[in-house]
Image: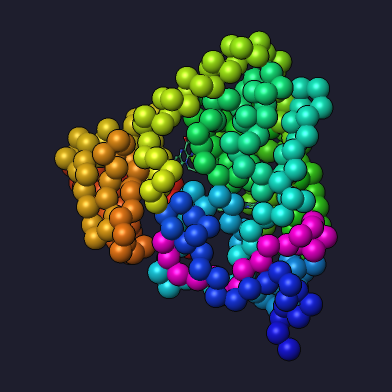
Amino acid sequence: MSWYEGFEHIVREDEPLGTYTWFRLGGVAEFFAEPNSVDELAQLLRRCDQHDIPFRVIGGGSRVLISDAGVKGLVVHLSAPAFCETSVEGSYITAGGGAKLGHVVSLSVGVSLGGLESLVGVPGTVAGALKGNADSYGASIGQWTESVKVMSRSGAITEYDRDQLRFSYRQSSLDDPVILSARFELEPRDPHELTRRMQKLWIMKRSQQPSGSEGSGRIFADPQGISAAELIEQVGLRSLKVGGAELSEKNANYVVIHSGAKTDDVRMLIEQVKNKVASELGVDLQCELQIW
Ligand SMILES: Cc1cc2nc3c(=O)[nH]c(=O)nc-3n(C[C@H](O)[C@H](O)[C@H](O)COP(=O)(O)OP(=O)(O)OC[C@H]3O[C@@H](n4cnc5c(N)ncnc54)[C@H](O)[C@@H]3O)c2cc1C
């Protein structure tokens, strides 16, 4: 009997994971599921727990690099409508963890609520953004978060309010297996001013990072306010290439992927940059990417 008996309609084996990530690289997930409801997700989590199956959630895959050998256990993708709903109530927006961050940003501007517009152009989902406290142009998602609903491995749901949540640079206290949804408290603003600001930031963002049409990813956190891209340029590594992975001409803190690239090319490129910046500038760059 297979551990996922009764879930055959949502569990697939050997699913190529690269297509769910921005890098479009790497091997397969041993098991992959797109549950249809919160209840179904809870049952699946409990089943994993009973059978000691490792469990991870992938959001927009913009911060995850899949190893060439693939991923053991179950990878869950919260793509069903039950996980992507959004609603507006006064100055509050509630969004499912699987909702695209860009959709929530546009929604907030559309209803004249300010705060999240700084995050325009940050790829990924609401849950991925909360997990790593996504930030851009001086604002982070954490500062607008009023509460977050999460699920444990036993399927139990807990809601954390603002006082129970901690957000810092590219980090949050959210280490529960699943982030289900969040409620944001925003500020009413002038709709024309808000739209203009979002458009301006979007243009700036597009000029500073590789376009979404190529496989790409942001590599390092900016160490204490210093731009990681500038440090990489200072040590003369602009446009460094390893196999099919190359630092972006637009921004040296992004890697772009060419055909035939392997995840190991990206790993080696990251190692070379980290080592050279450490030996020449004494700065220990921290990789923002998670390698699964
Ligand atoms: C071109 C480009 C530009 C970027 N610009 C920025 C930027 O300006 N600012 C910034 O902060 N970041 C930036 N990033 C990094 C990245 O987009 C963000 O960190 C983003 O918020 C990650 O969201 P995601 O849904 O893609 O997460 P993923 O990469 O899918 O996952 C990241 C982590 O979150 C976890 N996770 C995802 N969903 C859930 C869930 N439902 N429950 C529990 N855990 C979950 C995953 O398990 C993983 O640990 C950029 C990346 C790229 C490729």
Q: Residue at x 43, y 43 (%)?
A: 212
Question: x, y percentage for residue 42?
Answer: 79, 62
Q: Is residue 218 left or right of residue 60?
A: left
Highlighted range, magenta = 25-41
Q: Is residue 226 left or right of residue 135?
A: left
- Is 31 part of what is drawn in magenta? yes
Question: x, y percentage for residue 185?
Answer: 73, 26
Question: x, y percentage for residue 230?
Answer: 27, 33
Question: x, y percentage for residue 196?
Answer: 54, 15
Q: Does residue 229 sit above or below 32 in this rendering?
A: above
Q: Does residue 1 sit above or below 225 in this rendering?
A: below
Residue nearest the viewer, comparing 41 with 150: 41
Q: What is the quadrant of the N terminus in the image?
A: bottom right
Residue nearest the viewer, comparing 134 with 99: 99
> Seen from this angle, which residue lies furthest front?
213
- Is 197 part of what is drawn in magenta? no
* Coloration mode: rainbow
Please identify the quarter of the rendering in which residue 4 is found: bottom right
Q: Residue at x 67, y 54 (%)?
A: 79
Q: How many marks?
A: 0
Q: Does residue 61 sit above or below 168 in this rendering?
A: below
Q: Is residue 271 left or right of residue 280?
A: right
Q: Residue at x 67, y 29 (%)?
A: 107
Q: Residue at x 43, y 65 (%)?
A: 26
Please identify the quarter of the rendering in which residue 133 is found: top right
Residue nearest the viewer, comparing 237 with 80: 80
> Seen from this angle, which residue lies furthest bottom?
1
**Can residue 107 be seen in this snapshot?**
yes
**Can residue 130 be seen in this snapshot?**
no
Q: Does residue 38 sit above or below 44 in this rendering?
A: above
